[in-house]
Image (cartoon, rainbow, N blue to C red):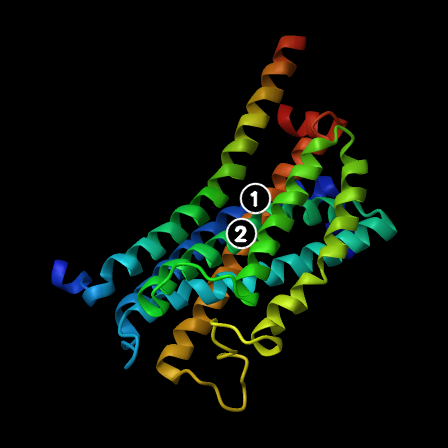
Amino acid sequence: MNISKIANLKFFYIKTKNISLFLSIMTLVLFIIGLYWGLFIAPPDYLQGNSYRIMFIHVPAAWLSLQVYIIMAVTAFIALVWRVKIMEIISIQCAPIGGLFTLIALVTGMIWGKPTWGTYWVWDARLTSELILLFLYIGIIILYSAFTDKRQAVKVTSILAIIGLINIPIIHYSVEWWNTLHQGPTVTKFEKPSAHISMLLPLLYMLFVFNMCFITILLKRIRLGIFQREKNTKWAEDYLND
Amino acid sequence: MIEFLNMGKHTEFIYIAYIFAIIVLLAGYFFPHFNLKKEIEKKKYENNKKK
């Protein structure tokens, strides 16, 4: 199967129908396993007790909030330079998903912060830059919906997405560049991880599951985006009549 | 059962965080799912009206 075929909107829309259902079921099963592992199998932390279990959803959501933004910016760049329709759709459909992951990261972080730090929110560099990321996602969604000409909208939102990329290293390195209440890197210290293997494994598993969630939701959103754009074309009319 | 679910003094924080994440992810999944269904029905209705 070649790339140009996948990039064909008609081909993508028709062929991904069954894949979408299969992915949804698989992700649900993997997610339930991850919840059980994180909540009931992983041992409690010697210092934080059970409240650290929030990390099993907070950390993957925070990682995905950055990862989705990078994917959005890269596809936006490709859409801007080469005018590939599928990339335009992927780029704009990433924004609401990235927004969801950022919201989950912020809210679960706040919930974890209360029993651990004694406060829901502090204006430290990590939390503030993550909040700016949420505003970037919301800004891109609002900007896109403000245009009636959607191809023009993609151009403008692509530029904003690429400019906003500057925030990603700021979020990632904020805990090293500034003195923050938020803890430093735990998982990415590969030579000597701070977390015990019994806690690291469910965390990495949940990271995989959150990636599956992202792919599943993205596929749904791409299919919606394709239909919205192509519903008046001949192939879409023919497909609906079949 | 309740004892099995008990997470000590921070039980409510843990479950609120998990439930919030699940609700947001489900909303993220079902919004495009039902939106696509609605768009297809609308298009089919328009096509039938034309006939």
A12 left or right of A191 in image: right
Q: Is residue A194 positioned above or below A231 on the image?
A: below
Question: Which structural element holds mark 2?
Answer: helix
A130 or A16: which is nearer to us? A130
Query: For the residue carrying disc 1, how many other residues have a C-alpha within 10 Å: few (<14), some (14-19), or many (20+)?
Result: many
Residue at image location 28% in from the left, 77% down from the top = A43
Give the residue type that dot 2 points to: Thr
Give the residue type that dot 1 points to: Lys
Host chain of mark 2: A
A200 or A117: which is nearer to us? A117
Residue at image location 81% in from the left, 37% down from the top = A152
Question: Which structural element holds mark 1?
Answer: helix
* Rendering coords of residue A137 (x, y %): 62, 49
Residue A220, label in figure: 1
Q: Quadrant of the C terminus of chain A?
A: top right
Q: Is residue B15 positioned above or below A17 on the image?
A: below
* Rendering coords of residue A170 (x, y %): 65, 68
Host chain of mark 1: A
* Rendering coords of residue B8 (x, y %): 19, 67
